[in-house]
Structures are given as structure tokens and as C-alpha cells.
Image (cartoon, rainbow, N blue to C red):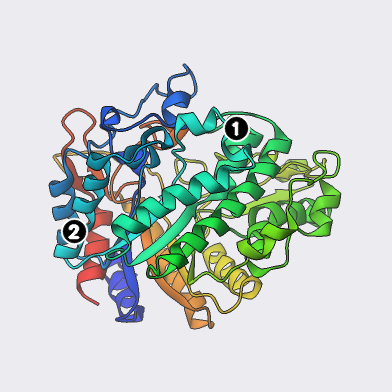
Amino acid sequence: MSEDTRASQLLERIPSEFTLGVATASWQIEGDSKGRGSSIWDDFAAVPGNIKDGTTADPACDHVNRLTEDLDILGDLGVDAYRFSVSWPRVMPGHQAPSSNGIDFYNRLIDGLLERNIKPVLTAYHWDLPSELEAKGGWLNKDIHNYFAEYVDLLAKNYGDRVDRWATFNEPWVSAYLGYATKMHAPGLGVPAAGLESAYRLMAAHGTGMSVLRDHNVRSPGLVLNLTTVIAEDDGAKAARDHIDSLQNHFWLDLLAGRGVSAELMQRTRDITDWSFVDQGELANIAQPVDWLGINYYTPIRVTSEATLAEPNAQGQDFSLYPGTPSGVKMASRDPRTEMGWEIYAPAMTSTLLQTSERLPNVPLFITENGGAFDDKLVDGEIHDQGRVDYYLSHIAAALDAKDQGVDLRGYFAWSMMDNIEWAEGLEKRFGIYYVDPLNQERIAKDSAKLIQYLARNR
């Protein structure tokens, strides 16, 4: 079947009210670090070796200085919505006095989106904690939820009248386990017990942030989690599968659903932490209803007890990210893969949506990130990223398969609008549908951008 036929058939399946959008994150694209306070990612990037190619926050995509150009690109794409994150240290440097310049930047972004009939979808926290708060313990500080509440209050006061949809956090699993349990991401603590505790405190802050957003009567407050399907390749891997599933998926959904922290998880991790930081009084606040849940899906996780079936680990698929995993198992991702080493397996998108709707029923779902890093080649001013085009075609179809099976799926956001700093991978891994020249910042539409544009404009 030709690519054009696949695209046209996919187009016929997308409902008119279904949201199609693209997504970015502040530290990855904004640049202009002199125009804001310092974040934990600035501190992390300053340590040689933490970012593979030595990339720092500047210039990134120079988005702060190229806002109008990027808004015009979004308008030309024809997407319904744009998901972005606010830089905490840009609007509240050092978590002290608000910055009028920082607040104004996001006012111009939001107003520019609305002028182009694009719905603003705001993420309050996408990993760039002010350095000064990390110095106070960061997401291990028992008062961190109060600091977060003050920040969210500032956002709601300034943008609550115009933002269409709010997320308190993006992927708290990553913040907790890549940043605190291991040294893969900022702040690079590397203490397993800290990963478990920060995961809980992030959710406590989510609950406090939700309360603030409700007080301001903003439209559609929710949360974004990175969820996936965990597959045991054999009976000997089932215990490990269940443990990984509990930390990757169940923990967050259980808290949102009012089930608390499971006794089984506490038992499996009893040698790591005693969970004394769990406050029964906070659990009800964490479990207050969300208007929607975002799911960031990229790849499944496979585990095996058969050493001969194991494959080299994909980026970020490491048992250190799942404290307490039973021994004697290995990761077993399969080909084909993206440049991150992540298995391309669209059916796991469907199963992830189905299991999420069962574990947290009656909550509308969005795919808030989905995409792949591929070895893009700029030839004669064009990038024919067939791998990424195929990825989008198969994964959007898989998301719609879940919708056809009864999942209340309301929309899909491609990751990412443009090539950016892929966190600890630096500029080496490219997820964008627009190529960004690292020397002159020129934006060039890839074939994948043309696909998203076709779907957005022709529904």
C-alpha cells in the first residue's frame, strides 16, 4: 500500500472533533538563558560528560527570539493545538519575584496561538526546576508542593483566561527515576530510595497544583504521564514485568484513582525505603478528579529470563530505573528501532490506551507525545524522513484502534514540532518534524511535517 493511500485512509478515520497537535518543552527549545533564572538542567549541563555532545541551553532553537517565526510555522501546519511548557525560572527566577519579561513572553506566545486559531495547551512543569529550589532539596523537600502551588498560582493568574488545557506535570516518572534514582538526568542524584520518595512528592505537588487550578476555575486541568505496555517474554520474567509495570504505570494511576500506594509495591521495595513519607492526608488531594490525562507513548518494555533472547538495552530501559526489580532478567527490546534504540511496535500504543482506560476509568485521554528519533539526512535542502512518516502513520492508526475499541481518546500530539536538545543526548538525537540547522537556526519542513499538515488541514 502506498504512503499516500495509507495517509488518505488514516484521514478518513480521524473524527472532526479529534484534536491534532504538536508539542515542545521549554528548556529544549527556548535558549535565552540570560533572560531567566538558572534551572537544574543548566547545572546538569555544566558538568562535563552529563550531556553527550556538550550541548548547553544556548541557543537551543532560539525560540524566545524567533517566536513569531515559530508561530507562523504552527499556523501553516494547520494544527488544532500546541502543547508547550512554561519555564519556571523564566517566570519566577529563583522562585522569588515574578519576572515581567518572562510572563510577557508566554502572553505573546498564547496570544499568538489564539490569533492563529490554535488552542494553547500549557504544561506547568517539564523538568526545569529552579536551581535554588534544588538547593533546598528539590523534589525531596517535604514543602516542595507549597513552592509548586505558588508557581501554579502565578501561571493561573496570568494565563487562566486563555489557556485551553492545563497539565500540572510532564512525566513525573522521568523526573523521579532518571533524575533522583539514577544520574541519567538532572539533578543526577543517583539514590534509589530518593527515586521512590520524589515520585510520591511529585504527585503530592500535582494534587496541590490541581487545587490551585480549580480555585482559579481554569479550563481542563489534568496531568501527563509516560505510560507503556510491559511485556514478559516468558514465565520467568513475569515477576519482573509486574514490578516494572507497578512503577511505570500502576503507581501513578493508583494514586489518581484513590487506591494509594499498593501494599505489594511497598513490600517489594521494603529494603529500599519504608515509605514513611506517605501522608494519608495528602492521598485524597492527589486523587481529586482530573479533567483529562495525557499519555506520552514511544515504545514498549520487554523483559526476559532467557539470556539468549536479550538485546542491547534501549536508551532509558535500565533496571536501575525500577528499584527493587527481581534479578535474573534482562531487557529484550526488538528490531526495528529508532535512533534511541527504542523498539517500534505500534500495537503497544493500542494496549497502553486500553489498559489505562481500565485502570483510570471515565477520564478522557490524549496522546500528548509520540514520535521517533531517526537518522535524518539533509539533501538538496530537503529531508525525506520515511522512517518517521511510517512511525506516525502506524501509531496514529494504533491510537485510533483503541478509540474504536471504546477508549475515550480525544486527541494526538506529535513529538516534536522541531529538532531540539534531547536532554542528556544533546543535539545528536532528532525528533522534530522540522529540521533546525544548528548553525543558522533555519527551520526546514521534513516529509513528516507535510504528513501532519495533510492530516490537520484535510480532516
The residue most toward the front is 97
Disc 2 element: helix
Three-letter residue code for mark 2: Asp
Q: Callout 1: few (<14), some (14-19), or many (20+) C-alpha neighbours within 10 Å? A: few
Where does the N terminus fall, quadrant-wise? bottom left
Q: Callout 2: few (<14), some (14-19), or many (20+) C-alpha neighbours within 10 Å? A: some
Disc 1 element: loop
Question: Can residue 414 be seen?
Answer: yes
Q: Position of residue 280 (x, y in %)?
A: 74, 58
In the shown orientation, is residue 312 left or right of residue 290? right
Question: Can residue 310 be seen?
Answer: no
**264 in relation to 86, above or below:** below
Give me the residue at 48% from left, 25% from top: 44
In the shown orientation, is residue 76 left or right of residue 209? left
**Mark 2 vs mark 1, CA separation in Å:** 36 Å
Q: Position of residue 274 (x, y in %)?
A: 83, 43
Three-letter residue code for mark 1: Gly
In the shown orientation, is residue 92 left or right of residue 339? left
**392 in relation to 337, above or below:** below
Q: Which residue is mark 1?
A: 137
Give me the residue at 49% from left, 51% from top: 149
Q: Position of residue 277 (x, y in %)?
A: 74, 46
Residue 111 numbered tag = 2
